[in-house]
Image (cartoon, rainbow, N blue to C red):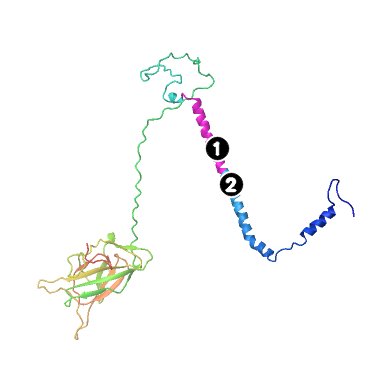
Amino acid sequence: MTDRSEPGTPFDPDELRRRLNEAVGGIAPAPDALERLRRGVPRRRRMRRAAAVGTGLCVLTLGALGVLNTGLLDKSRESIVRLADPAGSQQGRGIPRDGEIHGDTSQYPNHHQAASPRPGAARPGASGTLPPLVHPAPSATLVPSVPAPDVTATPVQPQPCTSGELLDTGAGEVNPQPDGKSGVGFFEYRNSGQQPCSVGGARGPAKVTVVDPASGSEVPFQPGGSTGGPQGMADVPQDRLVVVPPSGEVRFQFGWTAATDQSGAPERCTQPQTEKTQATSWTVQVRLSPGDPTISSRDVSPMCQGTLYVSGFYLKDQQQNTG
C-alpha cells in the first residue's frame, strides 16, 4: 500500500479511514426518519418565505430612510445658510445688516444714521464678493374670499307615465244613482315599467270623455273641477304630481251631476233596460292626454248629461280626501 502520509502527519490516512468507519459503522437511520423529513418540508418552506419577506421589508425600509435622510439634509443646509447670515431678519424689515440707516430715521429710533456710501464704494467690514441676501417683505394684499359653490343636488323628476306603462287593473267601478242624475266612479292603474314614472302635475288630470256607442259621437258634458262634485267624490287637486313606483298602483275618481230643464227634469239620459225597452248606455273613456290611446273604457247606465267632475291622481294606499 502506498504511503500517502505527509511529513509531520501523526496518522496514516488509511488507518484514519479505518477508524472513522469503525466509529460510524453501527449508526443506522431511525425507521421514521424519512417520514419526519417529509413532514418538516412545509415548516422549512414557511421559514424560507418568512426570510424572503423579511429581506424585502428591510430593503423597503432602507429605501424610505434614504429618502427621509435626503429631505433632512436639505433642511439642515437651509438652517446653516440662515445661521451664516444672522442679519437677514433685519434686512427683511428694510434695515441694513450693519444697523445703519440711510435717509429718514424717524421710523427707526434705535438706530443711528450714517452717510450714504458713494456709488461703487465698498462698505467697511462688508464682503465685496457676494451681495447680501434680501428677504422680500410679506405682502399685505388681501385675497378676496370666494363663496363656496352651491352643491345642493336638484332632485330629478321621473319621466311622465306613458299609456303603455299604466295598465288598468280592472278594479275600477262606476256607481250611478238609480235615476242616473248623479254618480261616482274610479279607475285604478298599475305601473308596469321598471322605473318610477309620474302622473298629474303640469299634465293635469286624466282626460275623461263620454261617448254614445249608437252614434259614435261624444256626449257633451260641462267640465267641472275636483270640487263641488257629487257626494262621495274625492277632493284631490287636479294638478297634484304623483310619482308611481314600479308595480305601484294609482287611482283617480270622476263623477257627474245632471243638467235639468226649467221644469227640473234631466235634459238627456240613458234608459235602463226594462221588459218593454232595450237598454241604452254611454261609454266612459279615459286617456292620459288628448290624442293618447284609450287606457280604460266602461259602459254606464243610467247616466244623465250634465257636468263631469274629475279628481287628481292619488296612490291607492293614500287617503283620498287630501288637498
- State yes or no: discs 2 and 1 in contact (Cβ < 8 Å): no
Using the image, determine if residue 258 lies above or below residue 134. Answer: below
Question: Of helix, strand and loop, which one carries label 2?
Answer: helix
- The residue nearer to you, when weighing 183 against 141, is 141
Q: Is residue 294 visible?
A: no
Q: In screen coordinates, is 187 left or right of 28? A: left
Q: Position of residue 201 (x, y in %)?
A: 28, 60
First in sequence: mark 2 vs mark 1: 2
User: Looking at the picture, which amino acid does disc 2 mark?
Assistant: Cys
Q: Is residue 67 magenta?
A: yes
Using the image, determine if residue 275 lies above or below residue 110. Answer: below
Q: Where does the magenta region start and end?
A: 63-87
User: Residue 21: which quarter of the image?
Assistant: bottom right
Which residue is the extreme one toward the right? 1
Question: Of helix, strand and loop, which one carries label 1?
Answer: helix
User: Looking at the picture, which amino acid does disc 1 mark?
Assistant: Thr
